[in-house]
Image (tube, rainbow, N blue to C red):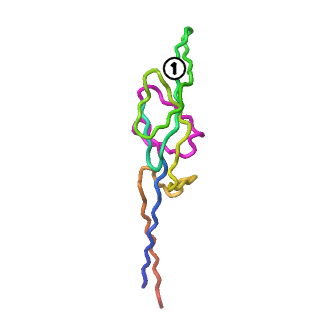
Amino acid sequence: MVVLCFKVSAQTVPTIIIDGIRATAINLSGFLYWLKEGQTLNVGNKVNSIYVLQYAIIPSQVGDNSLQFENLLNITSLQTVPSGKAWKIESAAIDPTAIITLGDSIGISPEYQSLTIVFTVLIFFC
């Protein structure tokens, strides 16, 4: 009998961290991530920076608020949305070593750094 073992490692899915909760950083333009004052944003696994549009919240006399564009921010560490502001996440600079997949066919959660899969092959000689 011969036993062969193979080890396969999976790379971390690129993530951003909103209020301490990880979210996938793949195709950010397909999702609308708006953050209000007091919320936090940080880069996660395999993300070098996050590009954010900052808006001032302007109160209106009729009771509604409007947004006025102020600045483009490059987030590289933990940041908090300032008072009277709103952020819209536009995109993220993904680390080139990240492996981008379109699906999760074997149930790998993004929070795991790596996954080891061991395959065992038994060969019998008669």
SS for callout 1: strand
Quadrant holding the N terminus: bottom left
Q: Residue furthest right?
A: 30
Compared with 119, 69 (above or below) is above
Q: Residue 76 at what x, y percent from top left?
A: 44, 40
Q: Residue at x 56, y 34 (%)?
A: 32
Numbered circles on residues, count: 1
Q: Along the line of sight, which residue is nearer the eye, 33 or 125?
A: 33
Q: Along the line of sight, which residue is nearer the eye, 61 or 111?
A: 61
84 in magenta: no
Q: Residue furthest bottom?
A: 126
Residue stretch rendered in magenta on the structure: 15-38
Q: Residue 95 at what x, y percent from top left?
A: 50, 51
Compared with 4, 103 (above or below) is above
Compared with 99, 61 (above or below) is above
Q: Residue 61 at what x, y percent from top left?
A: 55, 8
Instruction: Name the quadrant containing residue 78.
Output: top left
Q: Residue at x 52, y 48 (%)?
A: 94
17 in magenta: yes
Q: Along the line of sight, which residue is nearer the eye, 35 or 3?
A: 35
Q: Estimate how packed mark 1 is, as few (under 14), some (14 to 19) or many (20 or more) residues with alpha carbons within 10 Å.
A: some
Q: Along the line of sight, which residue is nearer the eye, 71 or 81?
A: 71
Q: Residue at x 47, y 27 (%)?
A: 36
Write down the residue under mark 1. 57
Q: Residue 40 at what x, y percent from top left?
A: 42, 33
The amino acid sitting under disc 1 is Ile
